[in-house]
Each structure stands twice: as C-alpha cells, then as structure tokens.
Amino acid sequence: MHDQASALRGLVAKDINRSPKIRVLAVTSGKGGVGKTSFTVNLALALAELEQRVVILDGDLGLANVDIAFGLSAKYTIEHLISGERTIEEILLPAPRGIEIIPGGSGVQRLANLERDKLTNVIVNLGRLDKRADLLIIDTGAGLGNNVLNFLKAADDIIMVITPEPTSLTDAYGVLKTLKQEGSEASIHAVINRVQTESDALATFKRIEIVVQKFLDSSLNYLGWVYDDPFMGRSVMQQEPLGIKFPESAAYRCIQWIAGKVIGISLHPPRKAGGVRGFLSKLLRSF
Ligand SMILES: Nc1ncnc2c1ncn2[C@@H]1O[C@H](COP(=O)(O)OP(=O)(O)OP(=O)(O)O)[C@@H](O)[C@H]1O
Ligand SMILES: [Mg+2]
C-alpha cells in the first residue's frame, strides 16, 4: 500500500498547481431510497443551466441508476477504463445539456483498490476530466458499505440527502459520526428532501443539527430543501428527468435554487491538491 501511495503522490505532484480543477461533490445518505439519484440527476441538469460542465460518476454498486434515470443505457463502465480496454472519452456517456456520465458498475469497487500497474493509466485518464468539466458529482450508495466512506472522505464537499423520516435522520447521523471519527475534512451540506413545507424542512434540519453539535462537536451546513412532488415519481417512471420533463415543478425549482448555492459553495478557496488528482490521491490513501 505504501508503494501505491508513493507512486500516486509522484503522479499527483507532477502538476499539482495545474488549473482549472474539477470540484468533486459526493451525494450520499444514511438510509437508501431517500432520493439521491433523483437529486443528483436534476442537480446536474440545473448546474448545466448555470453553464457548469458536469460529469456524474454513478458510484452505486447496485443497479445502474443514473443512466436509467436519463433513459439511457451505458455501453461501457469504469471497469473498461480500469482494464485498459477503453479511454475515459470512450466510456463517458453523453446525456442532455452536455452532461456526461461515468457508468460505475462493479468497477467502482475496484477504483479504490487499484492494482499498481493499473494506477497510472486510470489517473491519466481521469485526470483529463479536470479540463473537461467544472464539477464531478458522485452518486454514492446509501450507508457506509462498499467504499462509500472512501468516496466521501476524498470528496471536496458532501451533500447528505435526508428525509423527515426518523430512520433517515438516525442513519444520516450514523454516517456523520463515522466521518467525524475518520477525520474527514470535507464540508458537509444537508438537503432535506420530500418535505411538505419550508418549516418542515427547517424542523428536520434542526433535529439533526442539534445532535451533530452536541454529540459530534461538529457542524452541518443547511444547503436547502426539496418539496415532496408527485412529478418526481412520474419522471422516474417515465425515465425522463424532472428538469427536462417538468422543469416548472416545485421540486425542480428547489433543485435549481440549490444549484445556485452549490456554485456559491465552490467560491471558497480551492485546496492545493484539488481536482481529480487530489480526489484520487485521497481515495487511494485511505487504504
Ligand atoms: N422530492 C421528491 N418527491 C417525490 N418523490 C421523490 C422525491 N425524491 C425522490 N422521490 C422518489 O423516491 C424514490 C427513490 O428515489 P431515488 O432512487 O432517487 O433514491 P436513492 O436514494 O437514489 O435510492 P438508492 O438508495 O436505492 O440508490 C423514487 O421513486 C423517487 O420518485
Ligand atoms: Mg440511487
């Protein structure tokens, strides 16, 4: 592992001050099914409306979610990149508004456990994303299994999707606690999904904020909230994202507002070893 880390540090150090760099945002949750994939896809669409170039990494090991949400079907996955069969340009799946998807599949598991001989190729390929896009959004699996924690620790910012359900809150708290114990430096932003009113959202946020402050001596940023909206379910069924099919819907308007705030987030000073290389460096160092 030390060999791997030093090989990587060498690669990262080569052009650490290169700019511009991509910003890495991980979308996660404690409990499954709270709306991560729907949020990720529509956040990408809203960011694209704000002239941001977005790449989504489908980091969920389960079913391919992101391409299905767009009504697309991936030909290649990150596995083909790792094996050296395909380049990053060949595996990127084009989606509307210039968004590109990196289908993850089982390759996601391997990404954080790369064999040394595959490392250089993957870093060089993913490194090209720094020039190609402004934001890399990772749709992670729920909970902390299957390398999710490594993705979270390596990201610049984490968006924690929470619903007002008590189990969603307690599971989110569990993830936050582990991140704190692991010494994560990423900023954590809460999005309260599926709310009826703005005050419901605030009440939910306050519930988790209090325990995070009291028991973790930590803080959580309130990024925003998204209405519980029947159009979301309809767009999922029709495999056409809300931001395309129902752009005037209440939920999408919330996500557009959040996208504006996400661009605000990126105004804080970038880390020195940022971008994809910084992200990969941290991802691999966690082993
Ligand atoms: N704001 C919303 N209003 C109404 N329904 C929603 C909203 N957000 C998500 N949903 C519904 O919740 C369901 C689960 O959403 P989604 O697949 O995005 O969750 P997930 O967190 O990615 O799940 P998993 O943990 O399985 O990856 C979908 O059927 C979707 O329609
Ligand atoms: Mg999902």
Image: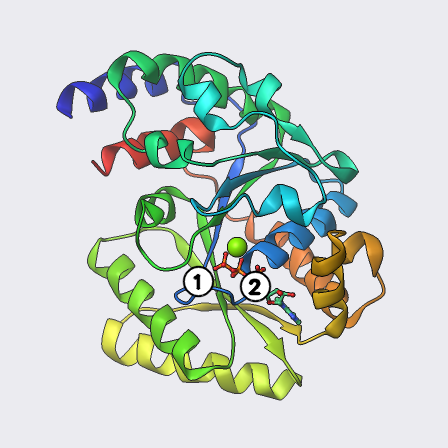
Whether residue 273 can be seen here? no
Indicate left or right for 114 with 190 as reference: left
Image coords of residue 39 (percent x, y): 61, 58
Label 2 and label 1: CA atoms lie apart by: 9 Å
Instruction: Give the residue type at disc 1.
Output: Ser
Q: Residues within 10 Å of mark 2 (few under 14, many from 20)?
A: some
Rendering quarter of residue 209? bottom left
Does residue 156 sit above or below 29 in this rendering?
above
Q: Is mark 2 within 8 Å of ligand 1?
A: yes
In this figure, which residue is indicated by the disc labeled 2? Answer: 35
Image coords of residue 88 (percent x, y): 55, 20
Q: Are marks 2 and 1 in contact (CB under 8 Å)?
A: yes
Image coords of residue 75 (percent x, y): 61, 26
Image coords of residue 248 (percent x, y): 85, 65
The one of 16 and 5 positioned closer to us in this rendering: 5
Q: How is the image coloured?
A: rainbow
Does residue 228 sit above or below 285 in this rendering?
below
Residue at image coords 43%, 74%: 168
Q: Is mark 1 within 8 Å of ligand 1?
A: yes
Instruction: Give the residue type at disc 2.
Output: Gly
Residue at image coords 49%, 83%: 204
Whether residue 279 can be seen here? yes
Q: Residue furthest left?
A: 2
In this figure, which residue is indicated by the disc labeled 1? Answer: 29
Q: Quadrant of ligand 1?
A: bottom right
In what element is the residue under mark 2?
A: loop
Rendering quarter of residue 113? top left
Label 2 vs 1, first from the N-terminus = 1
Does residue 4 sit above or below 268 in this rendering?
above
